[in-house]
């Protein structure tokens, strides 16, 4: 991940509370964390500018809660709350 995200981003991602990673074909990677509020605040405090928190609901139930950060090369990292199928 160092080449993809750079050393600043790698050190921040490696200190996340979870090592879960979901790799897809949407042009980004995703990591799952226990506490999205704490991760959002921690990443913001390092200058990474996490995006707006978004939620997906289905039939009134929360399906996913997440935000994105982006590295200087434009790669997106999705930070998902551990919930439902994202564990």
Image (spheres, helix red, strand yellow):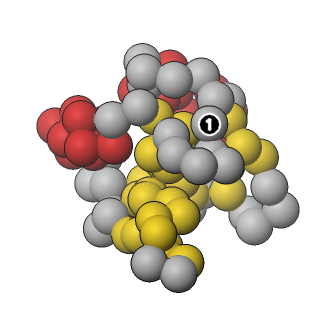
Residue at point 53% right, 53% down?
78
Q: Is residue 5 visible?
A: no
Task: Relative to 82, say whether 57 is above or below.
Answer: below
Q: Position of residue 81 (x, y in %)?
A: 45, 45
Q: Position of residue 14 (x, y in %)?
A: 50, 20
Which quarter shows the N terminus? top right
- Name of the residue lying farthest toward the right: 25
Residue at point 64% right, 29% down?
20
Q: Is residue 35 visible?
A: yes
10 sits to left or right of 35: right
Task: Relative to 42, say whether 11 is above or below.
Answer: above
Toward the viewer: 19 or 45?
19
Find disc 1 in the rendering and name its residue. 87
Which quarter shows the C terminus? top right
Residue at point 67% right, 57% down?
28
Residue at point 68% right, 35% down?
21
Q: Position of residue 40 (x, y in %)?
A: 27, 45
């Amino acid at each position: 991940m160092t080449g993809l995200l750079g050393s600043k981003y790698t050190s921040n991602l490696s200190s996340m509370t979870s090592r879960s990673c979901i790799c897809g074909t949407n042009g980004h990677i995703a990591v799952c964390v226990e506490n999205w509020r704490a991760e959002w605040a921690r990443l913001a405090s390092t200058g990474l500018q996490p995006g707006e928190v978004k939620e997906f609901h289905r039939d009134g139930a929360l399906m996913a809660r997440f935000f994105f950060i982006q590295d200087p090369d434009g790669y997106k990292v999705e930070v998902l709350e551990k919930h439902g199928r994202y564990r």
